[in-house]
Amino acid sequence: GAVVSQHPSWVICKSGTSVKIECRSLDFQATTMFWYRQFPKQSLMLMATSNEGSKATYEQGVEKDKFLINHASLTLSTLTVTSAHPEDSSFYICSAAGRVGTDTQYFGPGTRLTVL
Amino acid sequence: GNSVTQMEGPVTLSEEAFLTINCTYTATGYPSLFWYVQYPGEGLQLLLKATKADDKGSNKGFEATYRKETTSFHLEKGSVQVSDSAVYFCALSDYSGNTPLVFGKGTRLSVIA
């Protein structure tokens, strides 16, 4: 099946620094990637939708200047949390959809961000 | 807007017990419906899906039937195992694949031997 990877799997950073999370589709071309955020014991909340070569579409309430998303190729999307603060600590999950012959999104394993 | 409501957990069952996790949805049109599973320390995995009314999705002994009349997609398994312990998410999308998923809050299942 289609595989989506995320890097890093976990990261700890100091308040005020920026953190970049990568999402890669390993064996298919992802025309669309989604970024979700999951709080402890809660569901996934969509942050933004990213299409290759165009600007991401952010959900209401998500600051685009704080959560920078770049989808530079059909296999890579990045989420950069700028000037991170403790309230940004969360589990960030990407998913990818594309020309794999099915109508399914494939999820990465997630990145746990802890901001001190 | 679209929404998914699933039963609150946690659910604790003995091995070989029957499992039902209820899921109902609100959507315009005819959404596709999914169940995802998240094992401890891992990412979400698609468990099963159904794309139109009366479709039954099945995988690993789990089943769910797309019921348009009751706007439901309840997950069932006849005999759970300890290895089924995980968090289960019901989700929908307007169209399959390239549209975002709307998730329920998740139901944590613990199966004890």
Image (cartoon, rainbow, N blue to C red):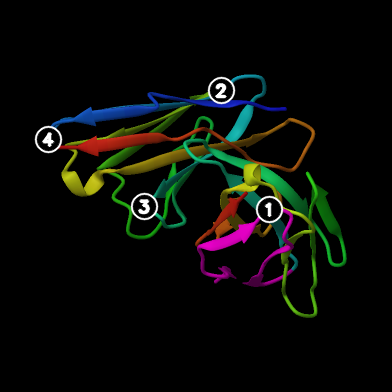
* Mark-to-mark CA distance, 2 and 1: 41 Å
Q: Where does label 3 land, which residue?
A: A39
Q: Where does label 1 land, which residue?
A: B15
Q: Position of residue B83 (x, y in %)?
A: 64, 42
In the rendered image, the quadrant that contains the N terminus of chain A is top right
Specify the subunit that label 2 lies on: A
- Disc 3 with disc 2 on a shared chain: yes
Query: What's the residue type where badge 3 is placed?
Result: Phe
Secondary-structure class at tag 1: loop
* Mark-to-mark CA distance, 3 and 1: 29 Å
Numbered range of the magenta stretch:
B1-29
Note whether A74 is above or below B2 in the view shown.
above
- Disc 3 with disc 1 on a shared chain: no
Q: Where does label 2 land, which residue?
A: A75
What is the number of callouts on the image? 4
Specify the subunit that label 4 lies on: A
Q: Which residue is found at the position 56% from the left and 59% from the top?
A: B102
Q: Nearer the viewer, residue A11 or A33?
A: A11
Q: Disc 3 vs disc 1: Cβ atoms closer than 8 Å?
A: no
Secondary-structure class at tag 4: loop
Specify the subunit that label 1 lies on: B
In front: mark 2 or mark 1?
1
In terms of sequence position, does the residue under pointer 3 or pointer 2 come before the other?
A: 3
Secondary-structure class at tag 2: loop
Looking at the image, can residue B64 be seen?
A: yes
Note whether A38 is above or below A79 in the view shown.
below
In front: mark 3 or mark 2?
3
In front: mark 3 or mark 1?
1
Q: Where does label 4 land, which residue?
A: A16
Secondary-structure class at tag 3: loop
In front: mark 4 or mark 3?
3
